[in-house]
Amino acid sequence: MAISVCSLSFHTMALDKVDVFGTGVQQGIIGNPTTFTSPPFTNDQYGVFVQNYVTTRGAYKMGGKAQKPAFLEAKTALMGAMDTTADYVNGIAKGNADIITLAGFKPTHQGTGGGSNPPVQAQTITVDRSLPSGQIGAECESYTKAESFGCILSEGQLLTSAVSITPSGQLKLPTGTATVYFSLSRQRKKLFTGLTSNLTYYVYFYVVNAAGVSPLSEGKSVVCP
């Protein structure tokens, strides 16, 4: 019998919809205290996550690359809060789609055929070496019922062993790691532009489905054309 869990597809939402989603979860959790008696965050804390995202995204749009680190930090914090809340809601809902919807999440059916367990680690990464200078394209193997594919490009060196993906999909990068680029589009095929020609990059993939997130793949090296 299929059950429902909180979909993690909010990780790949359009940027202008993320704050709306976060506010919806805030209202769903705080507005229903009988169902959600011990939420992981207070109303004020949810509000800070959302407002920081809105503020830094606006600054990034106006100020360009100099404002990007602050925006990415705020986005990671908001996504992390939503991941933690999704885990909390799943524990209360126990497969009940109505409770998941009440919390502001999208319920996703979790059954056989690849959706009842988190995806396994990606093993096959293919790199497109025919692109113009400063561009790298890559893809991993296909997965049944995958909701999205994340890709990380590490510049000049392999990521350290301390880099990991948490069960709820949060990427943990230690201080002092290599410069990294992210592709958070849903598609399996990725394209990175504006890179440095003749420099070695390392490509990593992870996969998201309704049940969770795969481990980060091993890095595949490629010299940027």
Image (cartoon, grey):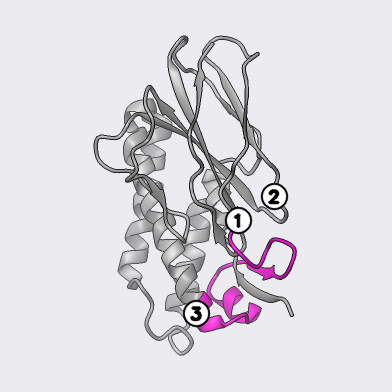
Q: Nearer the viewer, residue 199 or 70?
A: 199
Name the residue carrying label 2.
Answer: 143
* Location of residue 149 in the rendering, given as x and y in whole percent from the top left corner: 60, 44
Judging depth in this view, the residue of 204 and 25 nearest the camera is 204
Snapshot quadrant of residue 161: top left
Task: Report the residue at 46% width, 61% height from top.
Answer: 167
Q: Which residue is mark 3?
A: 91
CB contact under 8 Å: marks 1 and 2 = yes
Residue 194 falls within the magenta-colored stretch: no
How far is mark 1 from mark 3, CA to CA?
Answer: 20 Å
Identify the residue shown where x is 71% and y is 56%. Answer: 145
Residue shown at 34%/71% (left/top)?
41
In the picture shown, does residue 57 fall above or below 78? above
Q: Residue furthest bottom?
A: 34
Is residue 137 placed above or below 215 in the rendered structure?
above
Which quadrant would the C terminus be assigned to in this image? top right
Disc on res. 119: 1
What stretch of residues is rendered in magenta? Answer: 90-118
First in sequence, mark 1 or 2: give its number.
1
Percent coordinates x, y for residue 185 in the rendering: 59, 40
Contact (Cβ within 8 Å) of mark 3 with mark 2: no
* Horizontal relation, residue 11 to residue 53: left or right: right
Q: Residues within 10 Å of mark 2 (few under 14, many from 20)?
A: some
Whether the residues at callouts 1 and 3 have beta carbons within 8 Å, the answer is no
Compared to residue 184, the image places residue 197 above or below, namely above
Residue at (72%, 76%) from the top-left corner?
2
Residue 159 in view, yes or no: yes
Whichever of callouts 3 and 2 sits on the residue coming sooner in the sequence is 3
Q: Secondary structure at mark 2?
A: loop
Q: CA distance from mark 1 to mark 2?
A: 8 Å
The amino acid type of the residue labelled 3 equals: Gly
Please, what is the three-letter code of the amino acid marked with disc 1? Pro
